[in-house]
Image (cartoon, grey):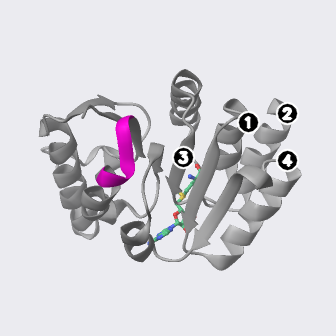
């Protein structure tokens, strides 16, 4: 099975899909293994590499994904079938900005891996969806090292940098949350909802 996952990763990368990098991927699966969440929400499923891997790591989990690109969503669903997890996973097609606010909650784990400039905007609607003790796992939070860096950020990246700084400030200063930021690859944050 591990071999098939590696093959899926190789194919996805070859086709230019922005799948989770190696160390961040390992950290995601380690966290899933520890927490064994019942209900997972994934913002940005892409072709399903991370969702398939989470569902194979935790065999009793179910997953709801959000993906904006129709063809990519279709590929993810084909991969769910190929890996035998389609009975535990579904994907909503559309813009996460519109879908997240209408979800009803009860998630034990949220993997935030969608558009980088929108994490802060999503946060206020994602936190109420998380159960107490639930985990918000976010990728790309240090965004090329620009986030909280004194180095000049290229103008075109300023919106994402500023939004990500607001996101990180919010999750590290809120007393109802416990957050660890990992300076690996593009940066990962793991936040536990305490109450
Ligand atoms: C980094 S990829 C996700 C990779 C995937 N989690 C993995 O590691 O296998 C981000 C995905 O978010 C999707 N996306 C971008 N903007 C979106 C939006 N506004 N709403 C929902 N999905 C979006 C992209 O089409 C892309 O497939």
Residue at x 37%, y 46% (from the top left corner) = 130
Which is more N-terminal, label 3 or label 4?
3
Whether pointer 1 and pointer 2 mark residues with C-beta atoms closer than 8 Å, the reply is yes
Q: How crowded is mark 4: few (under 14 residues within 10 Å), some or many (20 or more)?
A: few
Compared to residue 136, the image places residue 89 above or below, namely: below
Give the quarter of the figure containing the C terminus.
top left
89 displayed left or right of 69? right
Q: Is residue 148 at least partly visible in the picture?
A: no
**Frontmost residue, 64 versus 148:** 64
Distance between the Cα atoms at labels 1 and 2? 9 Å
Between residue 34 and residue 131, name the one nearer to us.
Answer: 131
Q: Which of marks 3 and 1 is in front?
A: 3
Percent position of residue 15, x then y: 72, 62
Q: Position of residue 187 (x, y in %)?
A: 37, 39
Q: Give yes or no for residue 170 being in the magenta stretch.
A: no
- Which residue is under mark 4? 84
Residue at the location (53% across, 60% down)? 44
Q: Which mark is residue 1?
A: 2
Quickly name the residue at label 3.
40
Up-down: is 151 above or below 117?
above
Instruction: Tell me which label, 3 or 2, sits earlier in the chain.
Output: 2
């Amino acid at each position: 099975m591990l071999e098939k996952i590696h093959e899926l990763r190789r194919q996805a990368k070859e086709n230019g899909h922005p799948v989770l990098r190696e160390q961040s991927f390992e950290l995601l699966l380690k966290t899933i293994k520890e927490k064994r969440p019942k209900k997972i929400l994934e913002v940005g499923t892409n072709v399903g590499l991370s969702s398939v891997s989470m569902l194979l790591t935790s065999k009793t989990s179910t997953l709801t994904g959000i993906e904006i690109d129709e063809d990519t969503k279709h590929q993810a669903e084909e991969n769910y079938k190929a890996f035998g997890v389609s009975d535990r996973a579904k994907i909503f097609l559309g813009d996460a900005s519109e879908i997240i606010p209408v979800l009803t909650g009860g998630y034990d784990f949220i993997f935030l891996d969608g558009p980088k400039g929108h994490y802060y905007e999503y946060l206020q609607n994602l936190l109420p969806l998380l159960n107490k003790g639930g985990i918000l796992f976010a990728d790309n939070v240090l965004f090329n090292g620009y986030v909280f860096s004194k180095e000049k950020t290229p103008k075109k990246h300023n919106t994402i940098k500023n939004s990500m700084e607001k996101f990180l400030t919010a999750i590290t200063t809120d007393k109802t949350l416990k957050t660890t930021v990992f300076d690996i690859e593009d940066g990962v944050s793991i936040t536990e909802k305490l109450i």
